[in-house]
């Protein structure tokens, strides 16, 4: 059983954070909230999302699991106004999720769990550098990097956090000192290279977020975490590095 | 002779209501105003429009008929600001309609009436259900229906008006009780299926209209009527049903 | 040596005025400011731009010349907010122009001057008619003309300035009397025909300009001049006429 009401903008932001990486997602439902963990088809990026029961206006749920077509879901939520309340109700007999908003009822078929990929394991990573910055900075750096290359390095050098990209003729670099950041701590230099394909999608999502926490290593994956729903939920991205060719 | 001045937004709204269904239209001009009746090329939808002489700021006209390229006309009107006054003047010698706005003069050639389809007859329909609703509701239902199907049913069941669409896996339904509508009267249940091709275009036009009157039957055409120009004009759409396959 | 700071909107407007006609430009730098003169690849249109040292917040420069990829430059400036300060610094060793804004540093490679076209000469023209008008009028006339033709005539007839285009069936004309213009002086009638390809691009640029000065002759080039940066810079377009076929 799953029946819940939630503000449209919270649900939209949450689901778009997922759909930016994967087309389909498997959600765990229990009394504490809903959560998902999924990797993109190329196994390069992972998204984890938790949305607490508190983030909902009303929430009734017994343990369960549902698989959803994220593109359809985000498309449907796109019809809601920001201030709309959205009602969700699972019909376990018809295998459909009823989505209600403003008198409109949409019955979305669940996907068959057996056709879905298994939930990925979260790798255990020890990343030496941590940076907290405004999501706008990340978006700006990624947009600039796209003009010169298809990949981008992020790193920490002493008290400086940098994002940079080198093209055949041009280069672009955004750097922030510890003073200009919300926070920076590191136990040594870090620098890793990432595909802009994924960073670009992630940067669009975080561009609205005031506090984004980044964990970095040396030629290691990057973790990008932030809160949603006024702290009643969290999103985490994990992105594998590209090998830097000299 | 035809010489008239009118607010840009009234003329724009009127002409767009026509151009959404037909590319060319034949207008009757007389001292009481202008009017048109036209069917789309597939004979599925009919538009009737009447714009009273009162809807114009100034209006001088003797009986006549002109045929216009609606796409060109709407394109030209698109250059006007909402608050512009538009002057129209027919030159019967050059067979052109002079359109003046803000110092700009556009001479639009009339189409040859002999190359146009004859004016359609208005069928005499006895439709048992009548619903008055906000045009926004219709637009919302149509946008949702487009996500699951290419056709949509509208109907009345007791005190409930509904619009619904069924796709291969998903369904969508918007319903309003009599209390939630501006008005609903019926002498029995009604339900007919329509192509979203036409409903979608019509819904865009009525989305700005506060009071839209719908007449419905059982597998019968739908009539969609509303006022323009503060009641000094009216638009009516008539749309043939599709046969529902079970 | 060249090191300068300037408001983003001034630099954007200036560079877009150039990039609308040419993809690459050669700039002269000296203590009084920067300037360029370039013709499009078909030798139909010429742009001249001068931006005084006063137009910059800070300006240090020794005599020099740099060649820039205008499309890249305008693309980079597109990332700046209107109120941003932009820092420019030439590195003569690496042959790169450093562009800094909001913590972002972009290193743009200079183009090789030897691969560029030579600076064109400015023809000496004696144009009998001069019109000063709001750039919006020009934009409106060009947009209307595009609906009927691919070229447009501009001219002066007594106290009337006109812009007009004739298509196969339709015609469009915008005219302004001397009273409706900022200024009009002429020593005889003028009328020349121009390709809308170029006029359309120029009209987009001047649409934001309150005072545009046009010099016209009879089947002669047109000069279109206006100030930028509160009078601390100026832009001039020169456009060759098309021969009018009767």
Image (cartoon, coloured by chain):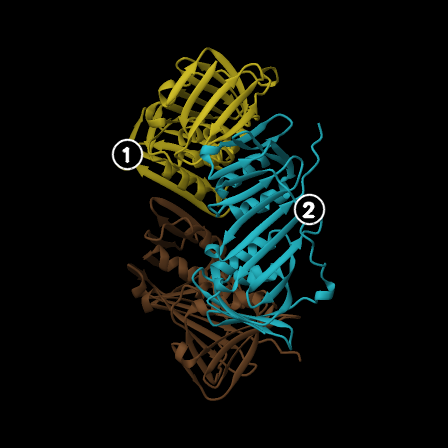
Chain colours: A brown, B yellow, C cyan
Provide the chain ID for the residue under circle 1: B
Quarter occupied by the C terminus of chain C: top right
Look at mark 2 in the image and give the residue it sits on. Answer: C44
- Give the class, few, some or many, for how many residues have Cα within 10 Å of label 2's Cα (few <14, many ≥20): some
Which residue appears farthest toward the front when viewing the image? C187
Provide the chain ID for the residue under circle 2: C
Which residue appears farthest toward the right when viewing the image? C114
Give the vertical position of A95 relative to B99 (above or below). Answer: below
Labels 2 and 1 touching (C-beta < 8 A): no
Does the rendering let one see residue B126?
no
Residue C181 point in image, percent of width and height: 47, 37
Residue A122 in the figure: left or right of residue C114: left
Tell me the residue at 52%/67% (across/down).
Answer: A142
On the same chain: label 2 and label 1? no
Residue C109 in the figure: left or right of residue B144: right
Q: Which mark is residue A17?
A: none
Residue C153 point in image, percent of width and height: 61, 34
Residue B43 point in image, percent of width and height: 54, 24
Query: Number of numbered discs present?
Result: 2
Where disc 2 sits, the SS reads loop
Q: Nearer the viewer, residue C224 or B58?
A: C224
Q: Nearer the viewer, residue B173 or A95?
A: B173
Tell me the residue at 71%/48% (across/down).
Answer: C42
Tell me the residue at 54%/54% (across/down).
Answer: C234
Give the vertical position of B21 relative to C142 (above or below). Answer: above
Does the rendering let one see residue B89?
yes
Quarter occupied by the N terminus of chain C: bottom right
Q: CA distance from mark 2 to mark 1?
A: 67 Å
Q: Which mark is residue B178?
A: 1
Judged by depth in the image, the label closer to the viewer, 2 or 1, is 2
Give the vertical position of A230 relative to C179 (above or below). Answer: below
Q: Quadrant of residue C119?
A: bottom right
């Amino acid at each position: 059983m799953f029946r819940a009401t939630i503000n449209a903008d919270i649900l939209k932001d949450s689901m778009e954070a997922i759909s930016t990486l994967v087309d389909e997602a498997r959600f765990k439902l229990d009394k504490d909230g809903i959560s998902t963990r999924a990797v993109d088809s190329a196994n390069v990026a992972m998204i984890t999302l938790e949305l607490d029961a508190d983030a909902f206006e009303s929430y009734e749920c017994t343990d369960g699991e549902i698989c959803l077509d994220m593109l359809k879901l985000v498309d449907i939520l796109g019809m809601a106004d920001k201030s709309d309340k959205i009602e969700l109700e699972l019909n376990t007999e018809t295998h459909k999720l009823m989505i209600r908003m403003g008198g409109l009822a949409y019955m979305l078929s669940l996907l068959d769990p057996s056709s879905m990929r298994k939930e990925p394991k979260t790798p255990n990573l020890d990343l030496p550098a941590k940076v907290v910055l405004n999501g706008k900075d990340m978006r700006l750096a990624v947009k600039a990097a796209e003009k010169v290359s298809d990949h981008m390095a992020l790193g920490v050098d002493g008290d400086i956090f940098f994002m940079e990209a080198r093209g055949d003729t041009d280069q672009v670099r955004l750097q922030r000192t510890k003073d200009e950041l919300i926070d920076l701590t590191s136990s040594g230099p870090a620098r890793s290279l990432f595909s802009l394909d994924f960073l670009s999608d992630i940067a669009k999502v975080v561009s609205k977020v005031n506090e984004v926490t980044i964990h970095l290593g040396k030629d290691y994956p990057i973790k990008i975490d932030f809160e949603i729903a006024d702290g009643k939920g969290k999103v985490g991205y994990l992105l594998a590095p590209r090998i830097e060719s000299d």
